């Protein structure tokens, strides 16, 4: 029997998201989440899929650390006959947020690779440490199978230097690894390819603008399947207006807040990452609430929504200029897939760029990839549900079965 299963792990500082997939038919066998790790109120939600097991299960109670969390996950999978000791498990795929310039493709993890991922912690202090912890625990549980790191930054590693470099002193930038890296790369990779398929073409034949709009949000310009620009930068803070992050900002705002406001670096960091964006402008980071309040005439919500859309339009226009020819603008992730008013507002007024919506098609809620522009539109507008776990599993499986 050929091993065809891949366990995908996304380890956060106090959580582990997981999916078990069978790459023989790209089906999901199970999925779940462990959250509030290290607290008395830890929670594990496990859902067998594809007909396995007895349905959704939930347990609460203290889960001390990531080791205990993954052992609890293993026990839930075993209860469904999907144990991690199965010879059908081909690999464990790990989401790793930052690969720097060193990691530009999926990589089998050994001690040297793990040490290099640790060395990148200064570039992603909120994410890479947790990713490392998940890798260490998984390697301990199944030391006999390949552990594969798939990096959020990898898809964007093709961005040319003139788009990746910031216009600061070159020696300083090199010394501290300051450049545009970009994030959400697994999503942008998956969605750009799926958009090409939706158009009936190979990825090499199309130019697409991908708008990944969730609580975190990013845009990318993809020419012939290759990313040539993206909105997030050294960190996930740059670019679009997000749920709690400011996006693009005059750097001197930081100096002003320090000098005039007396704020510390940590306070400013917290402000821009956790207390800005939609939340900072109107008190809500859930787009559904922002839209509800705006519809009721709430001025703060209206302004927040208008700012969000204004930034989206700027990036659509900018990436149209970068690409020269655009075949599709594609919306994905929680907001992009589900908020029809966001899609309508983002495209409104861009008819000269070839963008037109079919309002009836845009209003339809569906979990399928679909066009929401009329057949006569010069540029297709599409909604493509993202699938980062499938992308990670695909990349990991292809690597270990070459």
Image: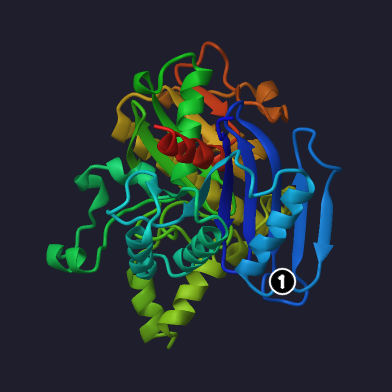
Q: Is residue 108 left or right of residue 160?
A: right
Looking at this view, is 323 or 262 the one in front? 323
Task: Name above or below for residue 285 compared with residue 30.
Answer: below
Observer able to see residue 65: yes
Please indicate whether residue 87 sits to the left or right of residue 264 in the image.
right
Which image quarter holds the C terminus? Answer: top left
Residue 8, position as x, y percentages in the image: 57, 47
Where residue 174 appears, x then y in whole percent? 18, 63
Residue 262 or residue 85, whichever sits in front: 85
Q: Position of residue 372 (x, y in %)?
A: 60, 23
Tell me the residue at 51%/31% (across/down): 330
Above/below status of 77 relative to 275: above
Element assignment for label 1: loop
Q: Is residue 256 above or below residue 27?
A: below
Q: Quadrant of residue 359?
A: top right
Q: How would you rate the neighbour count of disc 1 (Cα within 10 Å): few for under 14, some for 14-19, many for 20 or more?
A: many
In the image, 144: left or right of 175? right
Q: Residue at (26%, 62%) from the top-left corner?
A: 178
**Residue hosting label 1:** 63
Question: x and y percent of residue 350 in the render?
Answer: 47, 30
Q: Residue sitting at 75 percent across and 38 percent down?
A: 49
Farthest-out residue, top: 376
256 to the left or right of 210:
left
Residue 284 can be seen, yes or no: no
């Amino acid at each position: 029997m050929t091993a065809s299963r891949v366990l995908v792990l996304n380890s956060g500082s106090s959580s582990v998201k997981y999916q078990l997939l069978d790459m023989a038919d790209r089906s999901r066998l199970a999925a779940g989440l462990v959250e509030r790790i290290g607290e008395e109120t830890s929670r594990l939600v496990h859902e067998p899929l594809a007909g396995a097991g007895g349905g959704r299960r939930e347990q609460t109670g203290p889960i001390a650390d990531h080791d205990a969390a993954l052992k609890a996950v293993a026990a839930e999978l075993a209860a469904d006959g999907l144990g991690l000791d199965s010879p059908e498990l081909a690999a464990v795929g790990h989401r790793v947020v930052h690969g720097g310039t060193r990691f530009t493709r999926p990589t089998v993890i050994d001690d040297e690779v793990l040490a290099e991922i640790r060395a990148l912690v200064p570039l992603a202090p909120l994410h890479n440490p947790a990713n490392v912890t998940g890798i260490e625990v998984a390697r301990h549980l199944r030391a006999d199978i390949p552990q594969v790191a798939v990096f959020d930054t990898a898809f964007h590693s093709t961005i040319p230097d003139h788009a990746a470099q910031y216009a600061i002193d070159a020696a300083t930038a090199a010394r501290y690894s300051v450049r545009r890296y970009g994030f959400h790369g697994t999503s942008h990779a998956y969605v750009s390819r799926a958009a090409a398929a939706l158009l009936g073409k190979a990825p090499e034949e199309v130019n697409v603008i991908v708008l990944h709009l969730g609580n975190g949000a990013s845009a990318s310009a993809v020419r012939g399947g290759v990313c040539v620009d993206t909105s997030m930068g050294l960190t996930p803070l740059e670019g679009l207006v997000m749920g709690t992050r400011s996006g693009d900002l005059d750097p001197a705002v930081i100096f002003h807040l320090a000098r005039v406001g007396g704020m510390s670096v940590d306070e400013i960091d917290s402000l821009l990452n956790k207390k800005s964006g939609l939340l900072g402008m109107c008190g809500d980071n859930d787009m559904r609430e922002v839209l509800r309040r705006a519809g009721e005439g709430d001025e703060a919500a209206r302004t927040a929504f208008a700012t969000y859309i204004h930034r989206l339009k700027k990036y659509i226009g900018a990436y149209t200029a970068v690409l020269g020819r655009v075949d599709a603008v594609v919306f994905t992730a929680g907001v992009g897939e589900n908020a029809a008013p966001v899609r309508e507002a983002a495209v409104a007024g861009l008819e000269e760029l070839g963008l037109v919506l079919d309002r009836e098609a845009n209003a339809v809620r569906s979990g399928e990839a679909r066009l929401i522009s009329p057949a006569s539109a010069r540029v297709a507008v599409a909604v493509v549900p993202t699938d980062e776990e499938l992308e990670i599993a695909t990349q990991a499986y292809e690597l270990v079965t070459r």
